[in-house]
């Protein structure tokens, strides 16, 4: 599932390409046909992200909410677009303030729906602070973490606690700070949480800038290759059975609340 930095990159891209001008909205697949008809010809005023949720705001007061889920993706294309390929839930064409036309096709999202402002407020009220938003309040997350007996590895993935963090950032930021994913949230000190928050913000901003999750410090970015040819190196994520890049211990794997978990038992003692 795409992590928060991917949605923020999409929001920036869509805002720069489409905001400020009329857009043509259609649903070649048909599953969003009614919504597309309500939006077609409207002005997209802004695009933003909150955690793993993308929001397109229109001058009519309507808001398109997209959650990509496991299989959703946007395909960005210059104009003119060809015939739709596959199950295109939503096609968006516009030129924004510059007038240069672009298009994007959305396929396979978990959600693509029209909401009104109160419904968006209800959605965001359910989410924890998003490290990539300027209005994020880390105290909201700390309030939950410091009172919870759940492991910190689970809390970081809970979107009600922290919005936008996924499996890679969870595994890597805990490694970078030597914190076992199994430590209860309430066992963390405020200094430990503050350091985690600052690092999460910094790492996710790099992800927005580069389009890739760069999590290994430059002095450690050598040795064994990444888990995939097109991905930067990681410390522990998807490296189960391999030696830790720092201490040589075997990286471990387990499942925590239904999600794969990776950690080094030496660098992250319990």
Image: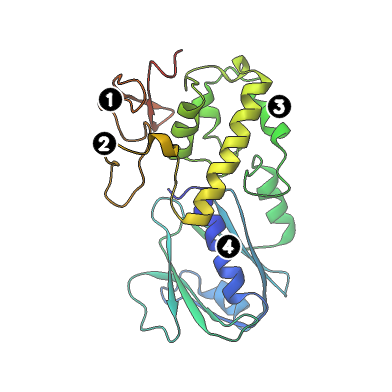
Which SS class for mark 3? helix
Q: Toward the viewer: 183 or 173?
A: 173
Q: Residue at x 66, y 41 (%)?
A: 129
Asked whether disc 2 touches disc 1, contact meaning CB atoms under 8 Å apart, the reply is yes
Residue bearing mark 4: 11
Residue at the spot 60% in from the left edge and 86% down from the top edge: 99
Q: Quadrant of residue 47?
A: bottom right
* Gap between marks 1 and 3 measured at Cα: 36 Å
Dot 2 falls on a residue whose secondary structure is loop
Quick one: label 3 or label 4, which is nearer the N terminus? 4
Find the residue positioned furthest to the front: 219
Structural crowding at the residue carrying mark 4, measured as other residues with C-alpha within 10 Å and reported as few (<14), some (14–19) or many (≥20): many
Identify which residue is drawn at 62% across, 29% down: 195
Q: Which residue matches tag 2? A: 224
Q: Residue furthest top?
A: 270
Tell me which numbered mark, 2 or 1, is placed earlier along the sequence. Answer: 2
**Residue that badge 1 annotates:** 243
How dense is the environment of label 1, judged by Cα within 10 Å: few (below 14), some, or many (20 and up)?
some
Mark earlier in primary sequence (1, 4): 4
What separation in Å lies between label 2 and label 4 (alpha carbons)? 34 Å
> In this image, 96 relative to 220: left or right?
right
């Amino acid at each position: 599932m795409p992590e928060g930095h991917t949605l923020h990159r999409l929001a920036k891209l869509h805002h720069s390409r489409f905001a400020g001008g009329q857009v043509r909205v259609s649903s070649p697949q048909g599953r969003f046909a009614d919504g597309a008809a309500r939006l077609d010809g409207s002005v997209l005023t802004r695009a933003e992200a909150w955690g793993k949720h993308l929001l397109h705001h229109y001058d009519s007061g309507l808001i398109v909410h997209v959650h990509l889920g496991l299989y959703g993706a946007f395909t960005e294309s210059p104009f003119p677009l060809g015939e739709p390929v596959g199950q295109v839930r939503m096609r968006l064409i516009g030129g924004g303030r510059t007038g240069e036309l672009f298009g994007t096709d959305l396929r396979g999202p978990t959600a693509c729906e029209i909401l009104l402002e109160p419904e968006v407020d209800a959605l965001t009220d359910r989410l924890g602070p998003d490290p990539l938003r300027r209005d994020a309040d880390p105290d909201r997350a700390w309030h939950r973490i410091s009172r919870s007996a759940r492991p910190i590895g689970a809390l970081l993935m809970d979107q009600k606690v922290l919005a936008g963090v996924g499996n890679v950032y969870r595994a890597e930021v805990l490694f970078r700070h030597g914190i076992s994913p199994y430590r209860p949230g309430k066992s963390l000190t405020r200094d430990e949480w503050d350091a985690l928050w600052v690092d999460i913000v910094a790492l996710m901003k790099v992800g927005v800038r580069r389009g890739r999750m760069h999590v290994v410090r430059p002095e450690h970015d050598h040795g064994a290759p990444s888990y995939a040819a097109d991905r930067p190196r990681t410390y522990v994520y998807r490296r189960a059975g391999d030696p830790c890049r720092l201490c040589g211990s075997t990286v471990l794997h387990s499942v925590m609340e239904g999600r794969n978990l990776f950690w080094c038992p030496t660098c992250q003692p319990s």
